[in-house]
Image (tube, rainbow, N blue to C red):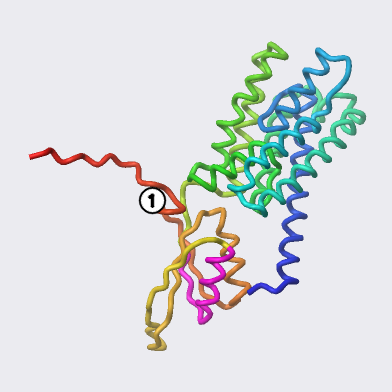
Amino acid sequence: MQSAGKKLWISAKDYVMIVVGILIYGVGFCAFILPEEVVIGGVSGIGSLFYFASLKYLPFEIPVWIPSYAINLVLLAFAYKIVGKQFVMRTIFGATVISLAIGVMQPLFHHILGGKPLVEGQTFINIIIGGLCCGAGIGMAFIHNGSTGGTDIVAAITAKKTNVSIGRTMLYTDFFIISSSYLIFQDPNKIVYGLIVLFLASWTADQIINTNRQAVQFTIFSPKWEEIADAINNEANRGCTVLDGTGWYSKQSVKVLLVMCRRIESVTIYRIIKSIDPDAFITQANVNGVYGKGFDQMKLKIKSKPNK
């Protein structure tokens, strides 16, 4: 099993990488997208709606981070039982950091750039760079078991219950938020730019997280197979199948572990195996059509037999 020191190091490394991902997201959002008055998806997009509406209709300004953080807390309250305590704690951390990042970067870039985007006069370039940064930040947070909050929470719940990719879930959830910007600007170009950011961020997040409809099959050879199987059951919440084999060179009986998991869980499985037996022999293969508990459900209509 992993020592307390090693677990602490892995956890600390994850938190550091979550912060790095969030900072990348913050730069893309505050330096490239927000100055172009483009509303993106997620709670940052909802926060942008409040911000732009306050500039147009209210005598005071509502910073993006305030409604964003409030909505994140509400979503987390609903998600607690589904995604688990660890994810919620990391997401509270991520939501807090991203709120702080936007709260600092928004006025900072506004002051430095005079309210203009980083690449002045090149709206499309700003949208492309901003979308790539946002997607990279979200993806980096997810692969280290964190989240920037918002529709990422909805995506994480969906990933737990179905095989729909995180990027696709974000696509469906965020479309309505982006379309709502028409109520403020009455400019369809803003919606088009917002959709470009959405598609870019979703695609980039999927590429980094490497999440798709494929599952992963591990074949594990180790004399410590019992410890590995117990750890995978308890820490990764995945089942193991123990097969009997024979090493033809040694002519000795061996136990082989067969494990199926989501691709996003493969890093966790590797960590568990290597922490118990660094010399374990492991193969990993992509598999399609994994059906059953914890994976996809068969969606077939069985023809009823005619009554005789």
Q: Nearer the viewer, residue 247 or 12?
A: 12
Give above or below for 280 relative to 193. below
Identified at 55% across, 31% down, the residue is 172
Q: Is residue 142 above or below residue 194?
A: below
- The residue that appears at 57% across and 71% down in the rendered structure is 273
Q: Is residue 42 above or below residue 273?
A: above
Q: Is residue 227 magenta?
A: yes
Magenta range:
218-235
* 31 w.r.t. 149: above or below: above
* Location of residue 105 in the rendering, given as x and y in whole percent from the top left corner: 85, 36
Residue 267 lies in quadrant: bottom right
Q: Residue at x 61, y 29 (%)?
A: 174
- Single out the residue that lies furthest toward the right: 111
The foreground one among 223 and 203 is 223
Q: What's the residue type where badge 1 is placed?
A: Gly
Residue that mark 1 sits on: 289
**In the rendering, at what x and y percent does residue 29 appear?**
76, 33
- 36 part of magenta stretch: no
Q: Quadrant of the N terminus?
A: bottom right
